[in-house]
Amino acid sequence: MTAIDKIRSRRDTGESMSAIAARLTGRGVVWLTLVLFAIASVVPMIWLVLAPSKTAADLISLNPFAFGSFEQYAVAWNNLMLFQEGRLLLWLWNSVWYTATIVAISCVTAILAGYALATAPIPFRKTLLITTLVAMIVPPVALVLPLFLEVTMIGIYNTPWAIILTSSFYPFGTFLAYIYYSTSIPKELYEAARIDGSGEFGTFIRVALPLSKGLLGMLAFFSFTAAWVNYFLPYVLVNSGEVLTLPVGLGVLFSATPALNPGLGASILPIRQPEIALAGLLVAIPILIVFVASSRLLVRGVLAGSVKS
């Protein structure tokens, strides 16, 4: 090896070592950022799970992550059931069937609309896509007054359908389905089905829908999350305790307890911080369960459309 070759070899080695060092540094920064975000997300959830196991006095005196007793969970639950004779269970059931209906309606309409925009020769396609994008950009709060007026005019104010129909409006899901069907499934499959004599709906049922499990997982998860924690819209559209959702009902419960509203003074209901933490778990745990159950479909749906067919 000549002297020039040795110099080039050392130079190449030095460049590769610096590149490796830079790559490792970049990965370290990424992992550190992810760990910090994970800690910031997990720590409050851990405290929320452990808080109902302690009394109100224990929450002040003990370590925040200390465990009390399993019996205290039962005590906190029984105390919650004293509020309006167990109205919490009715609110929980309302949220369950409202959300299930909203997810079903929004996913069906979004996936059909997205497929039609991506594959069917419909007029004004570009205009419809632009309208969908605008609907995604408009803040939901800006739509509350028009939706309130519309719900009042058609006579469904203060009914479950006032929440269900307005919450099923899902432009994000429509655009996501459009992106999926226009990029992830080869157009040759659609054309082959049409050549075999299948209509548009038959092509959707036999070709597109079986290949849309990842998309359905994403649509269902995001729709479920938005509907389950929705507070402002149900708060405006209903005012009867029998049709409230769980988040709105918990707002009523929290405003009626001195634990979060000291201006009320003493209360005969034994609802303190442990009971409030247990009520918060009723909202958080279903989202965690749905996320874990649909995690594989979510990953598949996130990767869908990343490579154009």
Image (tube, rainbow, N blue to C red):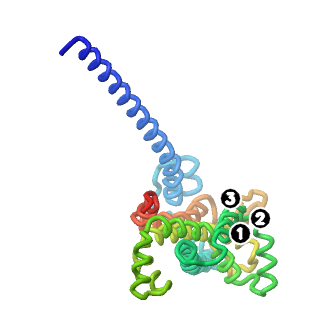
Identify which residue, 175 or 42, lies in the foreground. 175
Q: Quadrant of residue 35?
A: top left
Asked if 35 appears above or below 242 in the picture, the reply is: above
- x and y percentages locating residue 164 in the rendered image: 65, 79
Q: Earlier in the sequence, mark 2 or mark 3?
A: 2
Q: Is residue 122 left or right of residue 252?
A: left
Q: Give the vertical position of 90 relative to 305 (above or below).
A: below
**Residue 258's quadrant in the figure?**
bottom right
State the residue at coordinates (26%, 13%).
4
Badge 1 is on which residue? 252
Image quarter of the C terminus: bottom left
Q: Amino acid at mark 2?
A: Ala
- Depth check: give the residue in front, 284 or 291: 291
**Nearer to us in this view, 10 or 94:** 10
Q: Relative to 114, say whether 259 is above or below.
A: above
Secondary structure at numbered mark 2: helix
C-beta proximity under 8 Å, tags 1 and 2:
no
Q: Is residue 194 visible?
A: yes
The kind of residue tagged 1 is Val
Instruction: Bin the neighbour count of mark 3 within 10 Å (Cα to Cα): few under 14, some 14-19, many 20 and up.
Output: many
184 vs 75, nearest the viewer? 184
Q: Residue 13 in the image: x percent, y percent?
A: 29, 23
Q: Which label's residue is closer to the chain start, 3 or 1?
A: 1
Name the residue beneath numbered marker 2.
142
Mark pair 1, 2: CA separation: 24 Å
Residue type pointed to by label 3: Ala
Q: CA distance from mark 2 to mark 3?
A: 33 Å
**Horizontal arrangement in the rendering, residue 239 relative to residue 55 (left or right):** right
Q: On the image, numbered disc 3 is attached to which residue?
A: 259
Marks 3 and 1 close (CB-CB < 8 Å): no
